[in-house]
C-alpha cells in the first residue's frame, strides 16, 4: 500500500514538474551570457555607454547639421533644459506612498540637461547636472517600498554619470555610484534571498524596474562587477515574463498609455544594452514586440482619443511618440515615425517626455525603408484580446470601432469584457469612462489594487461592468476571472469580430456570444446571442455615452457637437431605451464625467421564449 501511495505521489510531483517546465518552455528566452567575466570582457571600456556611444553620438551630431526633424527636436530639448535651470532642486517629498513624481522629474531633467550638455558642453549645464545629482543622491533613500521610484531615479542618475563622461567632480561621481549601489541595486535584492515580485512579473513594473537596474549596473560595473553582473543576469531572465505578454499579436494588455510606459523603458533598455555591449540580447526581435507598434498606432482614434480600456488614459499627447520612433528605426516603417509632430513649433511642445533625450538619438537614426500602410481591420489576441476597425485617413467619416474581451483580473483590468468605443464624423459616440487618479483614491484608504470577486475596486464605475458598453445580468458584477475570448475575425470591406463572453457570467447565463459588424462605411451592428440559465432574471444591454439622447420609437437619436447618431433596436423594437444618468456618478469616489449616461435595453428572462434570445442593435450616422 505504501509503495502504491509513494508511486502516486511521485507521479503527481512529476506531473507538476513537467507542467511547470512546459510552461517555462513557452516563454522564449533572451540571450543571457552574463557573468563577471563576460561583463569585464564585453562592456565598452569608456563612456559613452547608455543609449549614446561614439557611433550614435557621431551620427546625432551629423544629423543636427542636416536633418530638420532632429534640429527641431533638439531645439525643444534646449527649451526644456532652460526650464530646468529655473526650477528649485528636488526634495524627497512623497505623494502618498510614492516618490514617483520626484523620480520622474529627475529622469526628465537628466534627459534634457544631459543631452544639451553632450552637444554644447556648457559649464553651467554641467554644474546644474552636478547639483541635481548631489541633491537626489543625498536623499535618505529612493523609496524602495515602491520600487518604480527607485528604478526611474536610478536610470536618471546613471544617464547623468554616463552622458557627462567623467566631467563631474570626482566626489559627485563617487557619491552617485555609492547611491546607485546602496539606494538602487542593493534594495532590489531582498534580505530574504527571494526575488522581488517585479523581477519576474508580467506587467510594466518588470520593464521599468529591470531597465532601471540594468542602467545602474552598467554605471557601477567597474566599482561592483559581481553585483552588476548578477543584476543584469536576473534582469535579462526576468524581462521575458513581461515581453511575452505582447504575444501573439502585439496587444499590450494594460492599454495604450501603459504600452507607452512599459515599452519606453524596454526600448531604452534595449538601446542601453546595444550601446554598452553591442547587442540588445534579443529584445528587439522578441516575438510580437515589434508588432506592438501597430497596436499602439491603431489604438489612437481619429479624434486623438485612445481606445482607453483598462487603466489607460484618455488621449494621446500632441507631441511625437519617441518610443514609436525606436520602432521606426528597427523596421524602417514610415507609419511609426511621426514626422509632422516632431516638426511642431517647439514652443507648442511644452514639457517633453522624460525619455526624449534618448528619443532624440533614435530620431537621428531613422531611415525610411518601407511605407507600410496600417490595416483598416486588425485583431490582437492574448490576455486582453481586442479588435480595431479604422477607416483610411482620407475617409471624411473618420470611422473608428474598437472592442475587447479579457477579464477583470488582468493587470490594470476592468470588468469590461465585450465593451467597445465608437467614433464617427469626428465624434466619440460610445465612450469608455477611462482611468482615475490612483493617489486620490489611495489617500482615502480605498483598496484599489485588490482583484478578488468582492474587492473594493469593483465598486467604481470606471472598473465595474456597469460603467462599460457590455452586457450585465441580474445587475450583478462580471466574474472577475471569466476570460472572454476572441472567437472570430474577418477583415475586408465589411469586417466582423466576435467574442465569447460566457465566462464573464458564470452560471447566470448558459452562453453569451457578441458580434460586431461594420455593415456600411457609416454604421455598425452589435449582435448578442444569449442563452439563459435557470438563474437568469434580467439581461441588460448597455451603451455608455456623453451625447444628448432623444428616445424615439424603436430606438434613440444621439446628439453631440451638432451631429447625430441613430440607435436602432432591431431585435426588440417594442422595448424602450432607458436612460440612466451617471453625472454625478453613483459614488463620491467615482470619476465625474460631465454628461455621462448609460443607455439600457432591459430584457426580463420571463419574456425570453425557448431560453434563447438575440439582441441586435444598429448604430448609424444620420
Image: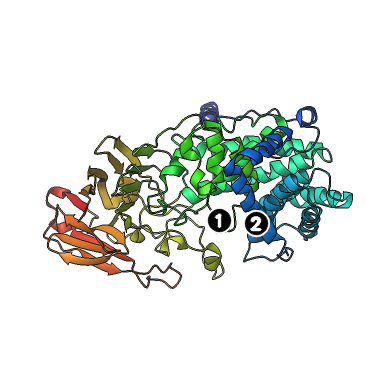
Residue 48 visible (yes or no): yes
Residue on which the image places disc 2: 79
Number of residues whose C-alpha sits closer than 10 Å to that of mark 2, classed few (under 14), some (14–19) or many (20 or more): some
Residue on which the image places disc 1: 349
Residue situated in front as seen by the camera: 101 or 181:
101
Residue situated in front as seen by the camera: 11 or 235:
235
Residue occupying the far front of the picture: 66
Tell me: 383 left or right of 507.
Answer: right
Residue situated in front as seen by the camera: 115 or 195:
115
For marks 2 and 1, the one nearer the N-term is: 2
User: Residue 519: where, in percent of width, then height?
Assistant: 21, 43
User: Residue 524: where, in percent of width, then height?
Assistant: 24, 48
Number of residues whose C-alpha sits closer than 10 Å to that of mark 1, classed few (under 14), some (14–19) or many (20 or more): many
State whether residue 51 is above or below residue 477. above
Residue situated in front as seen by the camera: 152 or 494:
494
User: Residue 209: where, in percent of width, then height?
Assistant: 64, 47
Tell me: 67 left or right of 387.
Answer: right
In three-dimensional space, the C-alpha distance between marks 2 and 1, rounded to whole angstroms, equals: 10 Å
Q: Residue at x 24, y 43 (%)?
A: 517
Task: Classify the position of the C terminus by image quarter.
Answer: bottom left
Q: Are marks 2 and 1 in contact (CB under 8 Å)?
A: yes
**Image-quadrant location for residue 414:** bottom left
Residue 235 visible (yes or no): no
User: Residue 304: where, in percent of width, then height?
Assistant: 42, 53
Tell me: 460 left or right of 617.
Answer: right
Q: Residue at x 47, y 56 (%)?
A: 313
State whether residue 179 is above or below residue 466. above
Tell me: 391 left or right of 314.
Answer: left
State whether residue 253 is above or below residue 134. above
Picture disc at residue 456:
none
Secondary structure under the numbered disc 2 in the rendered image:
helix
Q: How many marks?
A: 2
Amino acid at each position: 500500500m505504501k509503495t502504491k501511495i509513494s508511486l502516486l505521489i511521485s507521479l503527481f510531483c512529476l506531473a507538476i514538474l513537467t507542467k511547470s517546465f512546459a510552461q517555462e518552455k513557452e516563454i522564449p528566452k533572451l540571450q543571457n551570457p552574463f557573468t563577471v567575466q563576460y561583463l569585464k570582457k564585453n562592456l565598452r571600456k569608456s563612456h559613452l555607454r547608455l543609449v549614446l556611444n561614439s557611433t550614435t553620438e557621431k551620427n546625432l551630431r551629423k544629423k543636427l547639421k542636416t536633418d530638420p526633424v532632429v534640429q527641431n527636436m533638439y531645439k525643444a530639448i534646449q527649451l526644456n533644459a532652460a526650464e530646468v535651470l529655473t526650477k528649485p532642486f528636488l526634495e524627497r517629498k512623497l505623494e502618498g506612498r510614492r516618490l514617483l513624481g520626484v523620480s520622474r522629474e529627475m529622469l526628465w531633467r537628466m534627459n534634457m540637461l544631459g543631452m544639451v550638455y553632450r552637444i554644447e558642453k556648457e559649464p553651467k549645464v554641467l554644474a546644474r547636472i552636478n547639483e541635481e545629482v548631489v541633491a537626489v543622491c543625498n536623499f535618505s533613500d529612493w523609496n524602495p517600498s515602491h520600487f518604480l521610484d527607485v528604478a526611474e531615479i536610478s536610470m536618471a542618475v546613471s544617464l547623468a554619470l554616463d552622458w557627462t563622461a567623467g566631467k563631474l567632480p570626482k566626489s559627485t561621481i563617487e557619491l552617485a555610484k555609492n547611491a546607485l549601489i546602496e539606494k538602487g541595486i542593493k534594495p532590489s535584492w531582498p534580505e530574504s534571498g527571494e526575488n522581488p515580485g517585479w523581477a519576474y512579473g508580467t506587467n510594466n513594473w518588470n520593464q521599468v524596474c529591470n531597465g532601471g537596474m540594468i542602467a545602474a549596473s552598467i554605471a557601477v560595473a567597474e566599482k561592483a562587477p559581481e553585483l552588476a553582473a548578477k543584476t543584469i543576469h536576473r534582469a535579462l531572465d526576468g524581462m521575458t515574463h513581461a515581453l511575452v505578454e505582447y504575444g501573439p499579436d502585439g496587444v499590450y494588455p494594460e492599454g495604450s498609455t501603459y504600452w507607452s510606459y512599459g515599452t519606453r523603458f524596454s526600448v531604452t533598455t534595449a538601446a542601453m544594452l546595444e550601446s554598452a555591449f553591442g547587442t540588445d540580447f534579443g529584445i528587439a526581435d522578441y516575438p510580437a514586440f515589434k508588432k506592438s507598434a501597430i497596436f499602439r498606432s491603431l489604438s489612437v482614434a481619429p479624434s486623438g482619443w485612445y481606445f482607453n480600456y483598462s487603466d489607460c488614459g484618455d488621449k494621446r499627447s500632441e507631441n511625437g511618440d519617441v518610443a514609436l520612433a525606436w520602432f521606426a528605426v528597427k523596421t524602417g516603417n514610415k507609419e511609426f515615425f511621426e514626422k509632422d509632430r516632431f516638426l511642431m513649433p517647439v514652443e507648442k511642445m511644452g514639457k517633453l517626455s522624460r525619455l526624449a533625450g534618448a528619443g532624440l538619438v533614435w530620431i537621428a537614426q531613422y531611415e525610411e525603408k518601407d511605407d507600410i500602410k496600417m490595416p483598416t481591420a486588425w485583431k490582437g489576441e492574448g490576455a486582453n484580446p481586442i479588435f480595431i476597425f479604422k477607416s483610411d485617413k482620407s475617409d471624411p467619416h473618420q470611422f473608428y470601432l474598437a472592442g475587447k474581451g479579457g477579464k477583470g483580473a488582468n493587470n490594470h483590468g476592468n470588468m469590461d469584457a465585450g465593451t467597445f468605443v465608437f467614433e464617427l464624423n469626428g465624434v466619440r459616440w460610445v465612450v469608455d469612462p477611462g482611468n482615475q487618479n490612483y493617489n486620490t483614491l489611495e489617500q482615502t484608504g480605498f483598496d484599489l489594487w485588490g482583484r478578488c470577486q468582492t474587492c473594493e475596486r469593483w465598486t467604481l464605475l470606471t472598473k465595474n461592468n456597469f460603467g462599460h458598453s457590455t452586457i450585465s445580468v441580474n445587475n450583478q458584477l462580471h466574474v472577475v476571472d471569466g476570460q472572454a475570448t476572441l472567437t472570430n475575425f474577418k477583415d475586408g470591406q465589411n469586417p466582423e469580430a466576435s467574442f465569447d463572453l460566457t465566462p464573464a457570467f458564470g452560471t447566470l447565463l448558459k452562453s453569451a456570444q457578441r458580434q460586431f459588424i461594420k455593415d456600411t462605411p457609416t454604421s455598425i451592428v452589435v449582435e448578442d446571442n444569449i442563452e439563459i440559465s435557470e438563474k437568469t432574471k434580467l439581461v441588460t444591454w448597455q451603451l455608455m455615452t456623453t451625447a444628448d439622447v432623444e428616445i424615439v420609437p424603436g430606438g434613440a437619436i444621439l446628439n453631440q457637437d451638432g451631429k447625430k447618431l441613430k440607435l436602432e433596436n432591431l431585435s426588440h423594437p417594442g422595448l424602450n431605451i432607458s436612460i440612466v444618468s451617471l453625472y454625478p456618478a453613483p459614488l463620491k469616489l467615482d470619476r465625474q464625467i460631465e454628461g455621462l449616461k448609460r443607455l439600457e435595453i432591459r430584457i426580463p428572462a420571463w419574456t425570453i421564449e425557448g431560453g434563447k434570445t438575440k439582441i441586435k442593435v444598429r448604430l448609424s450616422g444620420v
